[in-house]
Image (cartoon, rainbow, N blue to C red):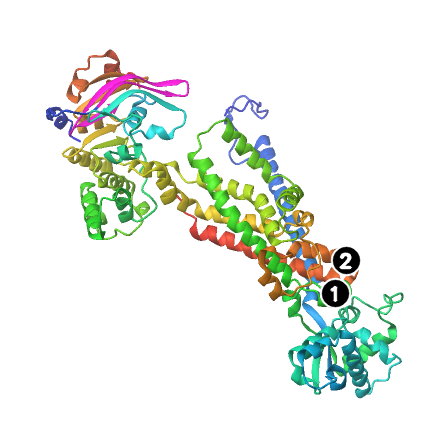
Amino acid sequence: MTDLTQNPASTPGQVPPRHGSLLTQGARTKRRNAAEKRFQLYGMIAIGIGLLMLVILVTTIVSRGLGAYQQTFVTLNVELLESKLDKNGNRDLDEIKKVSTFGYAPLVKTALADAVAGYGIDTSVPAKDMDDLLSKGAVAQLRDYVIENPDQIGQTVSFEFLASSRVDGYLKGRVSRESIANDKSISAEQLDLVDDLIEQGAIRKQFNLSFITGADASDQRPEAAGMGVSMVGSLFMMLVVLVLSLPIGVAASIYLEEFARKSWLTDVIEVNISNLAAVPSIVFGILGLAVFINYMHLPMSAPLVGGLVLTLMTLPTIIISTRASLKAVPPSIRDAALGVGASKMQAVFHHVLPLAAPGILTGTIIGLAQALGETAPLLLIGMVGFIASNAPDSIASGLLAPNSAMPAQIYEWAKRADPAFYERAWGGIIILLVFLVTMNTVAVILRRRFERRW
Amino acid sequence: MNQMTSVEKTVSTEANKITAEGVQVYYGDTHAIKDVNVQIEDKTVTAFIGPSGCGKSTFLRCLNRMNDTIDICRVEGQILLDGENIYDRKVDPVQLRAKVGMVFQKPNPFPKSIYDNVAYGPRIHGLARNKAELDEIVEKALRRGAIWNEVKDRLHAPGTGLSGGQQQRLCIARAVATEPEVLLMDEPCSALDPIATAQVEELIDELRQNYSVVIVTHSMQQAARVSQKTAFFHLGNLVEFGETGQIFTNPTDPRTESYITGRIG
């Protein structure tokens, strides 16, 4: 209140107002206002930097990852020669199955050479090297088709084969004639052939659904790798996490918050729960390895084990947020319930818990989202690896069959040598981010919808 | 409103409803209530007055064991309700609170409908066998709470949407819905305006027909208006207890006189 600085403008004779005019700012006020302006500026700069980072992040991810959603396909008419596929001609499935992919390879080669000749393309590529343009999986695709449709043997069927990752990269601009100088997988002549086939419409890019639904593929076939199986693995883990951590976490928080008498023991528990929330996730991973796999002999790489480890990680988050939302329910509601003769449990379950539910749900969803993006603990329990089974098989085999998880799959792709996998890692990150953003949006909507104000 | 009515109220000669003997309350190391003896009669309004922090609310909360919810609170001595010690180990506080209802300082309706607010107590105590009976109980309670006419058309509107005075009367209706024998009121009018206060006071006077009412109040005028008996608390001691008229016109203890005349508190 008292301003002790002397006013130098005071002259004898006229009495200046003690605090100066209201229309001019004093030196102190000016400094104070300048400091406030400066602080606001710092804040705006900080937000600007944050937004800029976000924009860089999103544009980088999208620009690098979108390529994975397009794939190059080669359209070919393949004659399914009876003489090669079913020598006896009796369409016995067991006999047809005896023909390995080696038996099918010549059919594909011939079909490609015939197509090139049919388009009237003049090429120096020998016919035996032409199938470098196709994915190594093309032959298997053909065989699967024949085994499923044995009556088609002897017909000519049109197929869309995956192009090899080099051809795919060439169409996407990842591979150029300079970059393949030391590449044994493809030559400049073959790229010329690709150019010609593109002109004829036999090679083109289209939307690649199997990236979203498919399984991982071996090192030689990045063009066939997909996220589907690891999405199923993540889903199984999230189910385990939800089923375990929500009831355990909520029960623990209700007991600690509403029933437990405050003592040194509850203090210790409280401090340790907060500490657990800050424990690096890899610690939980090695704990899971030691307890669940080495001691309890649960199967390696199984979503059940992954879910258990992530439950350990998620519990502190859920307990902390549940306790916070229980604390936020005004004590007068508890008094009111106890006052009309409700037992403590009735007061909690009839009145406190419904009011805390939006907060609990939000905390749970955010905990799940955290668990969904967690990679480190999965490395230790072996949930990174090559899972060759296709999506329907892995769903059927459930919680105990080896599986991968989305972040682990991304990590796996990112460390493989072929740059085509790198593109798929970015594509996988897009899927992961879509899940995370969706979950967080649901959390925000739930909070807005059900939040009650007093 | 009219101070004269309180003086001429006759005090019923029925047996004591609640008898407190040598009650001591400790909050951790703090001795909050020191050796209080008091008799609360049936079908009377007993007012507890005294300066802030004198322990009158604490003592009130002892009467239905609401203090049990505070970990560090410890009660000694005995409080008899109809001759039974409510601090006996065999007493379930939940059953006790059904007999001794409570209305709080701040109106605290549940964030549910008006109907559900009142029906909650009867529901958990199983007082109604079917919907019709429950409807009847709710209507009776709301009528006793003198709020029926205002809410009968919107029983399913949220109780939190009512005005402060209406909320407090709803809380009173909620408290009487479980058919308690004693009604404890902890400064029920401190958050209300004068008109709502007058309504609640009128209601308290009506409730006296059926219940024994204990009210904690900061307002001496309110104590004089609504109560037949008054207890004056000071620093955890029960200084004086007697007929309201006598306490306000002819207090025996100098501390009571100082408080009533405005020299302390």
The numbered dot on residue A416 is: 2
The kind of residue on which mark 1 rests is Pro
Find residue A96 and report its horizontal and vertical position in percent: 70, 79
Mark 1 or mark 2, earlier in chain? 1
In the image shown, does B172 or A384 lie closer to the viewer?
A384
Q: Residue shown at 24%/29% (left/top)?
A: B215
Is A206 left, or right, of B149 in this rendering? right
Q: Residue shown at 68%/60% (left/top)?
A: A387
In the image shown, does B42 or A281 lie closer to the viewer?
A281
SS assignment at label 1: helix
SS assignment at label 2: loop
* Above or below, A85 relative to B173: below
Kindly identify which residue carries mark 1. Answer: A222
* Above or below, A130 relative to B208: below
Q: Write down the chain letter for disc 1.
A: A
| Segment colored magenta | B19-48
In the image shown, does B84 or B90 lie closer to the viewer?
B90
Residue B47 forms part of the magenta stretch: yes
